[in-house]
Amino acid sequence: MELIWALQNLTPTAILDILIVALFFFALSFFIRGTQAVALLRGVLLLIAAVALVSNSLQLLALRWLLENLLTVLAVAVPIIFQPEIRRFLERLGQGTLFSRAQAPEAVRLRIIEDVCQAAERLAERRHGALIVLERNSSLGEYIRTGVPMNAQVSAQLLLTIFLPKTELHDGAVIIDRSGRIASAASVLPLSSVRTMQSPKLGTRHRAGLGVSEISDAIVVVISEETGRISICQNGRLITKLDGMRLRTILNAFYGLDRQEEVRLRTRLRGLFANGVLRRRQGRL
């Protein structure tokens, strides 16, 4: 009956009002998509829905009272919890860059892979430590802001210059954003929550690479300063002892190619993980 009444009293003004509210929430969801806020918000909504379902189905009056009061508290807590995301939303809205996060085309990504692989091979030969982060769907804006802004085109020569020892920018991470440009250098990344690494030769760079891959879908290339070995971090996993060819294969699978080729190469890599091939190679580091 309430639905029929609502449809009968639906006016053009009411339709416009509903569309404006829907557009607001769509813009908000578009902005936080791929960030850590999404997982937190999803968890909160699932918890509220579960508590509401249990309290209504079992007629638990005390639990229902608690839920009603918690909603008032959440109205105050949400702006505090999501303060960084709300601030970035308002900043990008004011700058007119709210919807300007298009991913670089495949040709650009393949060129970036080639530049990164060339730089990684030469850095490994010289035993120059490096940390290169490739942003994908998850936003790394909070870590980009910790470094020195660059907004530069990716090239092997520039990466080699940045990670030259004793320069101002070599100690930290280079972050390549979704548009395919170097967004920042000397950025600070969160360290992995893993207490013990697989080898004592895996230091802070590897821990930082694992850390950012645990909380985002970014791909991280790490070059060890001590051993000169190339590693890659993705989804909280560490693949070590890579050469240029294997590095290109993995980057193509997770970053470079379009959907069809990406699925095929990912299937091959998952098979390697399942068979323990890459894990055994890690153990021999």
Image (cartoon, grey):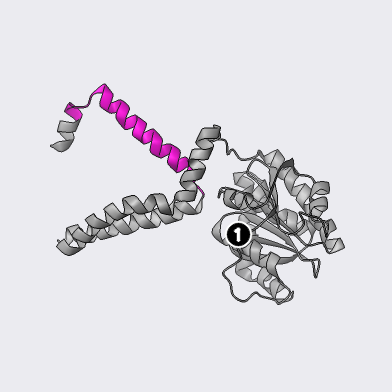
Residue 102: where, in percent of width, then height?
A: 59, 38
State the residue at coordinates (78%, 48%).
Answer: 115
Residue 187: where, in percent of width, then height?
A: 67, 54
State the residue at coordinates (59%, 75%).
Answer: 195
Three-letter code, disc 1 = Val
13 falls in the magenta region:
yes
State the residue at coordinates (44%, 43%).
Answer: 29
In the figure, is residue 234 to the left or right of 65? right
Question: In this figure, what is the number of numbered marks?
Answer: 1
Residue under numbered circle 1: 212
Write down the quadrant of residue 230 in the picture.
bottom right
Q: Nearer the viewer, residue 46 or 265?
A: 46
**Majority SS type along the magenta span:** helix
Residue 51: where, in percent of width, then height?
A: 26, 60
Range of residues picked out in magenta: 7-34
Above or below for 163 versus 277: above
Element on which disc 1 rests: helix
